[in-house]
Image (spheres, rainbow, N blue to C red):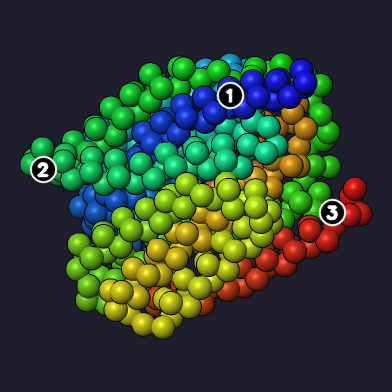
Amino acid sequence: MNQHVTALDGDRLAKRNALILAGAQALGGANPAIIVSLGGIVGAQLVADKTFATVPVSLLQLGIASGVIPAAMIMRRLGRRGGYLIGALVGATGASIATGGVTLGLFWLFCLGTFVCGLYGAFVQSYRFAAADTASADFRPRAISWVMIGGLVAGVIGPQTVYWTRDLTPAAPFAASFLAQGVLALLAIAIVSQLRAPPVAAVHSDGGRPLGEIMRQPKFIASVTASLVAYGLMSFVMTAAPMAMVACGHSVGDAALGIQWHVLAMFGPSFFTGGLINRFGKGTVTAAGLLLTALAAVVGLSGLSVGHFWLALVLLGIGWNFGFIGATALITDCYRPQERVKVQAANDFLVFGSVAIASFSSGGLLSHGGWDAVNWLVFPPVAIALLLVAWQRFQRPAAA
């Protein structure tokens, strides 16, 4: 009876934390949404060689990959709440630097700002793990999904912030949008200050197993591979899609609307993804997400109309949601409490490192091979990830 009451109390705390982190995700998730929406446009205004126009967006992803390990170290020393407060200040600083770059017309300064905003993104990306920390095994997938629902709100806040602020500074177009991005990061401080997370430093006192031993687990290999494939391919195709649409004669407005539908499709399913995981299993939902990613490529290869691009982007978003949330839930089975921060940091470093590489390479492949080449490249990584997810399921009886 006492154990049952303790579990209920634990999930009450987990639900509270998940709601807080969902609110923080809604504000922090607007950070990359604004940069992805404007990074290429502003970059094209600031640099003579348009080949480098998307570098600010790629540096955002590189900043996330570079920041996951330092963010983990900060949270290990100061706890989740202390780390997230610092992360929000980093986000406000990065937005201020980006604003300065736009105002002064300095491409390098703008790029530095988007990179620093990526460091903030590294903290934001760990919100889903923080929600899982205090959750029971049954509630954990739902806790992760709740946080991801905050991303759906961010998908509205980010574009609307751009819409309402884009013309406020005519002498420096879009500078006000990045200034508003900094304000959103500061607002997140009031939310994350309410977090009640377990002390990360305390659970790391004995260090747990060596990271190499943990990383050799079939489930770890499968979950990390599925995460980086789901997220990497999403970033790869999403970065190329607007440029491909414009190259096919569609308007910039059509391309922007396609990205907005894509973002909504990324986070909208989070309302029920956790329930699907509890019903069908983590591996099954992860595999479904990978298959939807492949289906998006099939649609992309089947035509070049606005409808084809939009449908491909929507399927890509849903595939990312299932694949990434499912793989995140899988990774939580791979570590003990005292090992969680280092394993989570290793997971995110691998995932967002691949995302940065995908973002940098997308524009080059599109310019040399076209939209078809981008879509054909989706299938081999998806096949590998599906095989690994199936492999870890067959390993389960042996591990037991």
Residue 235 in view: yes
| Residue 121 left/right relative to 252 | right
Q: Position of residue 2 (x, y in %)?
A: 76, 18
Residue linked to disc 3: 396
Q: Amino acid at mark 1?
A: Arg
Image vertical order of residue 256 relative to residue 169, above or below: below
Front one among 322 and 220? 322
| Residue 216 left/right relative to 176 | right
Q: Identify the residue at image location x=36%, y=33%.
A: 27
Q: Identify the residue at image location x=57%, y=32%.
A: 131
The residue most toward the bottom is 302
Q: Position of residue 220 (x, y in %)?
A: 74, 49
Q: Earlier in the sequence, mark 2 or mark 3?
A: 2
Closer to the eye: label 1 or 3: 1
Instruction: Find numbered disc 1 in the image and state the secondary structure of the residue it sits on.
Output: helix
Image vertical order of residue 226 relative to residue 205, above or below: below
Q: Identify the residue at image location x=47%, y=59%.
A: 318
Residue linked to disc 1: 12
Whole-Å distance between the Cαs marked 1 and 3?
Answer: 31 Å
Whole-Å distance between the Cαs marked 2 and 3?
Answer: 56 Å
Q: Earlier in the sequence, mark 1 or mark 2?
A: 1
Around disc 1, counting alpha carbons within 10 Å, would you say few (fewer than 14), some (14 to 19), or many (20 or more)? Answer: some
| Residue 263 left/right relative to 279 | left
Closer to the eye: label 1 or 2: 1
Closer to the eye: label 2 or 3: 3
Q: Name the quadrant containing residue 134.
A: top right
Residue 369 in view: no
Q: Which mark is residue 167?
A: 2
Q: Amino acid at mark 2?
A: Asp
Name the quadrant of the N terminus.
Answer: top right
